[in-house]
Image: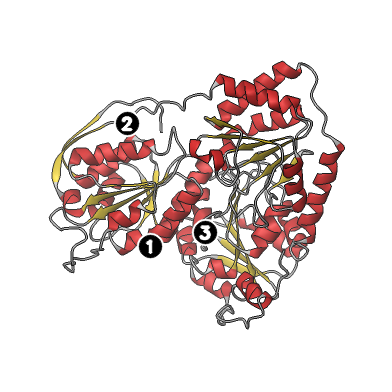
Amino acid sequence: MSDTASADVVLTGVSGGEVVVASLAAHGVEVTWGIPGTHNLSIFDALGRYGIRTIATTHEQGAGYAADGYARTSRRPGVAIVTSGPAVYNAAAAIAQSYSDSVPVLLISPAMPRSLAVGGPGTGYLHEAKDQRGAMDRIAAACLHPITHQQIADEIAFAFTYFSGRRPRPVHVEIPLDLLDERGDAVVRVIAIAPVAPAAPDLISAAAAQLVEAERVVIVVGGGAVGAADSVRQLAERLGAPVGSTINGAGVIAGDHPLSFGARLWAPSVANAVNTADVVLVIGSELGQSDLFNGPFAPMGRVIRLDIDADMADVNLSSELMITGDAKDSVASIVAEVDRLLGDQSKSPGEWVTRARAAVEESARSNATRWLPWISAMQDSIDSDAVIATDNAMCVYYGLIPNYVLRQPASLHFPTGFGTLGFTVPVAIGAAVAAPDRQVVGISGDGGLLFTVTELATAAAEQLPIAIVVFDNSGYGEIRNEMVDRGEAPLAVAAPPRDLVLLARGLGAKSLNVATPEELGAAIRAARTHPGPTVIVVPESPREEKL
C-alpha cells in the first residue's frame, strides 16, 4: 500500500462485490486466497476483471494461513475471501493466529441480509450464525460492517489503516449478502497513512546515555524489530552487547554472529545474562510464553523498551524507560546518538558474553540430540535467504529453532502465542506466492500436517516447488510425553494407521520416505526443480526427550 493518496476511482451502477474488488485493487492487492460460495459470487465475478490473482484453497483455514504466510514474507497485507457463516468460522483460527503474531491479514466475507436481525432466535437462513460480527470482533483487531456501497469502499480503506502506522493486526470486513449483489455508486479512495510519530528525542538521548554508561548490556529483539535489523546489528557491535531474539525476531541478527544468542530466550544462560545486565533493551516484543517457557525474566538492572505499541511498556516485564515509535527509525536514532557519545571507540564484548554464548550453544545442542544430524543436512541444502514455514512440533521448537542458523529476518514463520497446528503447508504456499524466486521449505510433525494436509492439492494446482519435511512420530508426540511424565497412560495421542507418502501423492505431491540425513538433503535440493510440492517423511520413534 502506498503512503500517499492515489487518484479516486469513481464507480457507477456496480455491484457491491465490484466495490470490494475495486477497493482491493486500489490498495495494491495482487493476490487473494479463498473459496467461492453462494453468498460471495459477486466478489469472485469481479476479481478476474480487475486482474487480481485468485488462489482457491481446499479449506478456509488454509486460506487464512496462506494469507498470513504471504504477509509475513512480503511485509504487505494478505487477503482471504470466504463466504458467510461456517466459512468465516473455519478461517477464525488463522485470524486468531495472525492477531497473536501481529500479522496484517484482511478477511472479507458476506454477512446476513440487512433485513435479518442479528442475535435473534434464528430463521434458518443459509449460513446464518448467532452473531458473526460479534464473534469476529473478539478475534480480529476489528470487524467492520458496511451497509452501503460507499461504506464498503470506506471501510476497506479504513481496514488498511490497521496495517500501517500502528501494530499490524488482522481485520474482518463483512458485507451484507444482499448488498453484494445490489447495484449502486461509490468513490474508492486510498487513505494516506501518516507516518508513525518519531520517538521523543529526549527519550532517545536518555536511552543512548544509559546504554553507553552500562558495563553489561543485553538486547532482546522480537518481530517488531524485523525492519530494524541493520541498526540492531550496528548497535550491538558498538556496545559489545549480545542479542537474544524471540522466534519471530529470529534472523534480525545473524545466528552465527559472535554477539548472537539466537532464538533461545528460554535458555538458563540467556536468562542469567538478562537478569544480571546493567541495562536490558527490548525491541518490538511482548516476551511471551512461547519464547520464555522456562519462566519470565527478572532483571536487576534497568529495562528500556522500544515498541510501536505504547501498551507494551509493562507487558510481562516492567520498563523504566518506554520509547514509542517505529523500530527502524528509533533504533537508527539511538545508534546515531551512541556514535556521538562513543566517538571512534566501540565497546568490546566482555568475557561474560563469550561464556554465555558457549553455554547457550551447549543448551541448544543437548536438548536436540535427536534432530541435530537432520538439521545439519537442512542447513547444507537450504539457501541463506530461504523462507522456512514451521508448525508447533517438537522437531521445530526443540530442534530447528534453537539450532538452525538463520541469517535473514522474517525468514522463519512459526505460530507463536496462539500456537495453532496445521500452519506449515498453507503458510509455505503463501510464502512461495509472495517470493517466487526464493526457496521455500516447510517443517512439520505428522500431527500438525494432517490438520491442513489437503492444501498440498492447492500447492500442486499452483505448481509451487515447495519442500515439506515431516518428522513422523506416529501421533501427538509432545502430548504423549506430557501424559507419560505425569504418570498417566497415553490416551488418544497415537496416530491411526496411515501412509503419509501415499496420502501426499494422492493430493498431487511428489513424496518419499528418507532414512538418512544425506537423503533428506538431496530430497530438499531436488524439490526446487519439481513443479509442485514435495513431501519428505522422516520416521521417528514415538518417545522423545523433553527439555
* Residue at the image position 59 percent from the left and 45 percent from the top: 438
Q: Is residue 42 visible?
A: yes
* Residue at the image position 69 percent from the left and 60 percent from the top: 398
Whether the residues at callouts 3 and 1 have beta carbons within 8 Å, the answer is: no
Asked which secondary structure carries label 3, the reply is loop
Q: Earlier in the sequence, mark 3 or mark 1?
A: 1
Task: Say which residue label 3 marks.
Answer: 423
Q: With 490 as the anchor, is 112 left or right in this view? A: left
Query: Residue flagged by tag 1: what amino acid is it?
Result: Asn
User: Which one is in front, 488 or 72?
Assistant: 488
Q: Position of residue 52 (x, y in %)?
A: 35, 44
Q: With 430 as the anchor, is 254 left or right in this view? A: right
| Marks 3 and 2, how far apart at CA | 32 Å
Q: Earlier in the sequence, mark 2 or mark 1?
A: 1
Task: Say which residue label 1 marks.
Answer: 90
On the rendered image, what quadrant is the N terminus found in? top left
Task: Say which residue label 2 marks.
Answer: 190
| Marks 3 and 1, how far apart at CA | 14 Å
Query: Residue flagged by tag 2: what amino acid is it?
Result: Val
Q: Position of residue 491 (x, y in %)?
A: 57, 82
To which quarter of the image does residue 389 belong?
bottom right
Position of residue 219 relative to residue 474, above or below, is above
Q: With 343 as the anchor, is 532 left or right in this view? A: left
User: Which one is in front, 136 or 396?
Assistant: 136
| Marks 2 and 1, how far apart at CA | 30 Å
Query: Residue flagged by tag 3: what amino acid is it?
Result: Phe
Q: Is residue 28 visible?
A: no
Q: Position of residue 365 (x, y in %)?
A: 79, 57
Q: With 349 as the anchor, is 327 left or right in this view? A: left
Q: Earlier in the sequence, mark 3 or mark 2?
A: 2
To which quarter of the image does residue 537 belong?
bottom right
